Amino acid sequence: MLKKGVYAATLSVLNNDSSLNVEATINHAEQIIAKGLHGVFFFGSTGQSQLISMTEKKDLISKLSTRKLKKKFFIGTGNNSLNETIELIKYSIEYEFDTFLIMPPAYYKNNTDQGVYNFYSSIIHHIPKVKIVLYNFEKLSGYKFSPEALKKLVKSFPKNIIGCKDSSYNLFEDVKIKNFLMFPGSESKLLKGLELGCAGCISAVTNVTHSLSRKVFDDFELKNNQVSNKKLIDVRNIFDRYNLISALHSYFSIENKAYTNLLPPLVLLDKEKSNELQKSLEKINFNGLENKAA
């Protein structure tokens, strides 16, 4: 069951032939959970979800079901196709995964409130027991949830629409719904969100800031002084200068060359930008092996 906490949109690790390395992808997720995260979402945008085949997604899901940390794993569907989204959810439910991060279909930039409502209602009609975390990310989907559109979905399907990852940042400050989990999409918004009643965060950069993010979350819960939030925000701000997938894979590839593999059109940072990233992190004393999960 999804609950309050700090989560990563975890990375997908690829083989040299561009196929998904299922074991390495799961190992990466387990390592960052061990560093402090409450859980991870596979096949979010950070996991190259739109670029990975249905067959590979199913292969990973079947393997996830055998792991000890199974209850800390959640699935992003990462499909534009309604029917493929439904197919992947049904397959996942067979392996006892019932909570999914789902963004409205991308590509067509004329998404409307009614069209998006129809998309989610169709999923729920076909799979009445599904639990959905809405993914609000206009930059990728071309659609930004308004507070009214989100509230309409929750009102219509209160047992199904259980939360939102807000990466457009137009919802987390003002939308207040009882028993609804609101997660800003950046750890730079983590503490502010918690103070406003949010549930935590779901972020790409918690692949790196796992321990710092957990420290901020725990200190808030325990009412301790916040001693880590400034550095957490500083690290996030450095990564935000770059394409996040490129920057994260470049960062991890220094220790493990498997992370150099990306699916086109994604690419690593060039040498100059990669060095710039590393130097910026060193400047704020965030570049030790203890901060890396792989």
Image (cartoon, grey):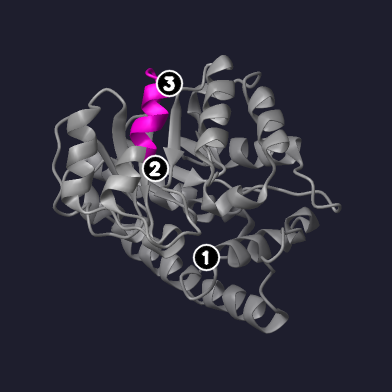
Tell me where residue 57 sits by quadrant: top right
Give neighbour class at mark 2: few <14, some 14-19, many 20+ (Cα, 10 Å): many
Res 127 label = 3
Q: Position of residue 159 (x, y in %)?
A: 27, 22
Q: Specify the segment rendered in magenta.
A: 119-130
Mark 1 closeness class: few <14, some 14–19, many ≥20 residues within 10 Å = many
Above or below, comparing residue 294 to residue 40 in the picture: below
Q: Which residue is at 32% across, 60% downward? A: 168
Q: Circle 2 sits on which residue? A: 6
Mark 1 or mark 3: which is in front? 3
Q: What residue is shown at x 74% (from left), y 35% (from top)? A: 23
**Residue type, numbered disc 2:** Val
Between 112 and 168, the one nearer to me in the picture: 112
**Relative to residue 183, is residue 175 drawn left or right?**
left
Residue 138 image offset from top left, x and y in percent: 37, 61
Residue type, mark 1 in image: Phe
Cα distance between the residues tagged 3 and 2 = 27 Å
The residues bearing labels 1 and 3 have C-alpha atoms spaced at a distance of 44 Å
Callout 1 touching callout 3 (CB < 8 Å): no
Q: Is 239 on the left or on the right of 176, as rendered?
A: right
Among numbered discs 1 and 3, the one appearing first in the sequence: 3
| Dominant SS type (magenta) | helix
Disc 2 and disc 1 in contact, CB within 8 angstroms: no
Mark 2 secondary-structure assignment: strand
Tell me the tag on residue 286: 1
Q: Is residue 252 above or below residue 177?
A: below
In the rendered image, which quarter is residue 251 located in? Answer: bottom right
Pair 2/1: label in front = 2
